[in-house]
Image (tube, grey):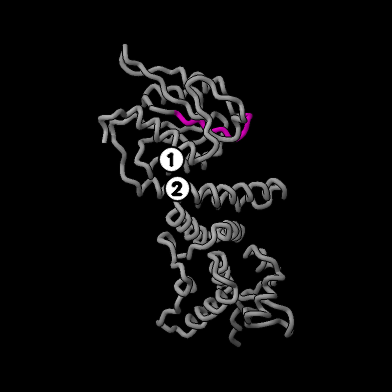
């Protein structure tokens, strides 16, 4: 007697909700309002979701994350699912195409109110939805500009996810790691797509202090410098003091940015040593401007040869003015 084919696994509403990062109540509401329930119910009542059912919900989540109203998102997701089952080659108009503001150039997701985009990015991160994060981040940077995207959406989302992790006993650590990776990816794309700066200009050297692992804010600064076609060198996280000193002497930077996330890594003695490092030919030696970046430095006044910006925009303005002054009037 031939064996019966194994039935595809089905998930409970609770399991699907955890997978998507939404509440079971939301799933039940979508079922009642928009007919987005599972195709089959065990015993006539209990919802059991198949892979195909979950794919429709994931499409719904991606659309609502991008700011599409739930009722419209449900119609698009169900239409796409029906078209896929019927193998219909005709495309279904996207929700973004029917909005007054079209999709941004990054990932095809429509731009909307920036507060909605903050919520959308956080929801996509909780769902571990990498493609949605890629699209949202690219549209944010291209549509609003790097500085506004970082200060209004990306940094607050990273902080919110970090607080969630700290208050929940190591839960959501995977959310923070995945979100950080996608943020780093889009920032490096900005650097890679920017035109090269002058090769003979003194660069801005950027480093996290010894023991400091939080390098994403420095990557945002690197992307901003690349947009302004300013030369820079990124050393990244937890740079040992000896390696930092050697890099300053070897590169002769116009400025050195030292990032500290917490007061435990804010080494003012090391910062003073960097500010006092002289390089260049005898008789015309110079010292770099030292920029103390990050909350770890606190509100204490910086020492001689050092500045303390309060955010990404101010740091970029300081470095742009300083690089222009160092380059002199004979550069274009």
The spot of residue 117 in percent (x, y) is 55, 59
Tell me, yes or no, if residue 319 can be seen here. yes
Span shown in magenta: 256-264
- x 46%, y 67%: residue: 101
- In which quadrant of the rendered image does the C terminus lie? top left
Q: Which residue carries the number 2 mark? A: 187
Q: Which residue carries the number 1 mark? A: 222
328 with respect to 74 (left or right)? left
Local secondary structure at mark 2: helix
Asked if 29 appears above or below 318 in the picture, the reply is: below
The spot of residue 248 in percent (x, y) is 41, 24
The spot of residue 155 in percent (x, y) is 56, 47
12 with respect to 133 (left or right)? right
- x 40%, y 48%: residue: 190
Asked if 132 appears above or below 25 in the picture, the reply is: above
Magenta stretch contains residue 108: no
């Amino acid at each position: 007697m031939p064996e019966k084919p194994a039935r595809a696994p089905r998930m409970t509403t609770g399991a699907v909700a955890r997978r998507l990062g939404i509440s079971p109540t939301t799933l039940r509401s979508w079922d009642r309002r928009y007919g987005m329930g599972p195709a089959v119910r065990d015993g006539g009542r209990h919802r059991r979701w198949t892979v195909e059912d979950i794919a429709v919900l994931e499409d719904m989540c991606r659309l609502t994350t991008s700011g599409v109203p739930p009722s419209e998102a449900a119609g698009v997701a169900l239409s796409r699912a029906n078209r896929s089952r019927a193998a219909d080659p005709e495309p279904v108009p996207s929700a973004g195409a029917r909005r007054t503001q079209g999709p941004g150039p990054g990932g095809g997701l429509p731009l909307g109110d920036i507060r909605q985009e903050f919520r959308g990015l956080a929801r996509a991160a909780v769902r571990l939805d990498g493609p949605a994060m890629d699209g949202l981040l690219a549209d944010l940077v291209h549509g609003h500009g790097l500085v506004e995207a970082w200060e209004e959406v990306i940094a607050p989302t990273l902080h919110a996810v970090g607080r969630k992790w700290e208050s929940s006993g190591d839960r959501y650590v995977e959310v923070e790691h995945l979100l950080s990776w996608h943020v780093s990816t889009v920032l490096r794309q900005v650097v890679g797509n920017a035109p090269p700066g002058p090769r003979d200009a003194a660069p801005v050297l950027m480093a996290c202090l010894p023991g400091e692992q939080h390098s994403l804010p420095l990557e945002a600064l690197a992307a901003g410098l690349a947009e302004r076609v300013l030369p820079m060198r990124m050393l990244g996280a937890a740079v040992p003091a000896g390696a930092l000193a050697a890099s300053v002497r070897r590169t002769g930077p116009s400025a050195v940015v030292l990032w500290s996330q917490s007061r435990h890594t804010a080494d003012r003695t090391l910062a003073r040593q960097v500010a006092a490092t002289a390089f260049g030919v005898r008789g015309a030696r110079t010292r770099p401007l030292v920029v103390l970046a990050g909350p770890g430095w606190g509100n204490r006044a910086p020492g001689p040869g050092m500045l303390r910006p309060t955010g990404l925009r101010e740091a970029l303005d300081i470095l742009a003015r300083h690089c222009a002054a160092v380059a002199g009037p004979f550069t274009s």
